[in-house]
Amino acid sequence: MAWQIQCTASAPLISPPPSLKPKCLPPHSLVFTLPVARSSRFRSTHTPSPRPVAASLSTVESPTSADGLDDSSKTPLLEVKGLTAVIAETKQEILKGVNLVIHQGEIHAIMGKNGSGKSTFSKVLVGHPDYEVTGGSVVFKGENLLDMEPEERSLAGLFMSFQAPVEIPGVSNIDFLNMAYNARRKKLGEPELGPLEFYAYIYPKLDLVNMKTDFLNRNVNEGFSGGERKRNEILQLAVLGAELAILDEIDSGLDVDALRDVAKAVNGLLTPKNSVLMITHYRRLLEVIKPTCIHIMEDGRIIKTGDSSLAEVLEEKGYTAISAA
């Protein structure tokens, strides 16, 4: 099941020294939720921004890309500035000023220790009711994301794959996906697809995630292995065609073959228009889905941004080396 950031990021709202300005790799090639009831638990005390946040406001700037075009020529997809958030029930602050910009066609990865705020950040983006936004701004496709309900964010093109997708007994995969896809088409002003039309649409996408057709008749995630659940998440992404996919530890619990299948599917969905934000602990995922940039999160902030060499430093020396840098 799923809910539905080139390369700038920083920890606090002040500009970092030049030494923290990373060189990033050029783009390599990239939640949905079913509409859900509006939750009274999700609250935001931020002051809405009257206009999109300019990419230049980000505190760590990317250099000119390999194609000779600087960031100003690229289209920002997601712009996060000074985002702070607390747990709604306890008011414990988790996010303490996150800054991040993702342009179209980029793949970003966030790494960090357990409890650093990675998953909380992703959940806040999709409007999870357990968290309350207390400051900052988030602009998605030029619109104020924080003013949208969770289902509105999904229909706008934001997708999130959870670490542990839940089961939906009594609802078949094909019915779930058909309803989800038609909700997205309706939002885009397109006619809905009937069962036969939808089957013709989804059938070729099964090969992308290495699934058989009988998979469609099974109830959503019921009795699925870990690998099947992750494949099902990517199938949802393939069907919905979201502009920004947030993959929260998509490699968790996968064996080598399943990881290869999932990575192949994600890479197959990449276009110059959509983007991916991956959250992971492991370098192995970054070897099969090549990121444009890697961000290190610590204590609710992004403290460092760089290329794939950051993952190598982490593997050899651990997070202590990054924190002390």
Image (spheres, grey):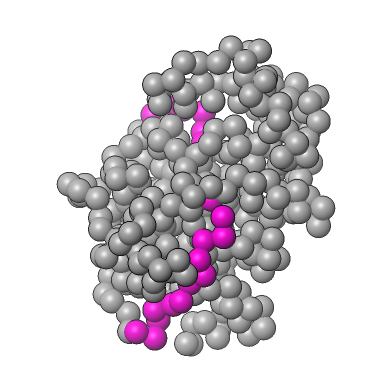
Query: Whole-percent x and y of residue 140?
Result: 35, 46
Q: Quadrant of residue 164?
A: top right
Relative side of 271 to 95, left or right: right
The residue closer to the viewer here, 172 or 57, is 57
On screen, residue 195 above or below 17: above
On screen, residue 203 above or below 25: above
The residue closer to the viewer here, 239 or 220, is 239
On screen, residue 280 above or below 268: below
Task: Report the predominant secondary structure element of the magenta stretch.
Answer: loop
Query: Whole-percent x and y of residue 241?
Result: 53, 36
Q: Quadrant of residue 161?
A: top right
Q: Quadrant of residue 214?
A: top right
Query: Whole-percent x and y of residue 26?
Result: 50, 66
Q: Quadrant of the N terminus?
A: top right
Is residue 24 a member of the stretch shown in magenta?
yes
* Residue positioned most to the left: 50
Q: Residue at x 26, y 75 (%)?
A: 14
Magenta stretch bounds: 18-38
Is residue 218 a member of the stretch shown in magenta?
no
Q: Is residue 291 visible?
A: yes
Query: Whole-percent x and y of residue 98?
Result: 37, 63
* Residue positioned most to the front: 68
On screen, residue 16 above or below 104: below
Q: Residue at x 55, y 86 (%)?
A: 321
Number of disc labels: 0
Q: Is residue 121 visible?
A: no
Q: Residue at x 49, y 50 (%)?
A: 272
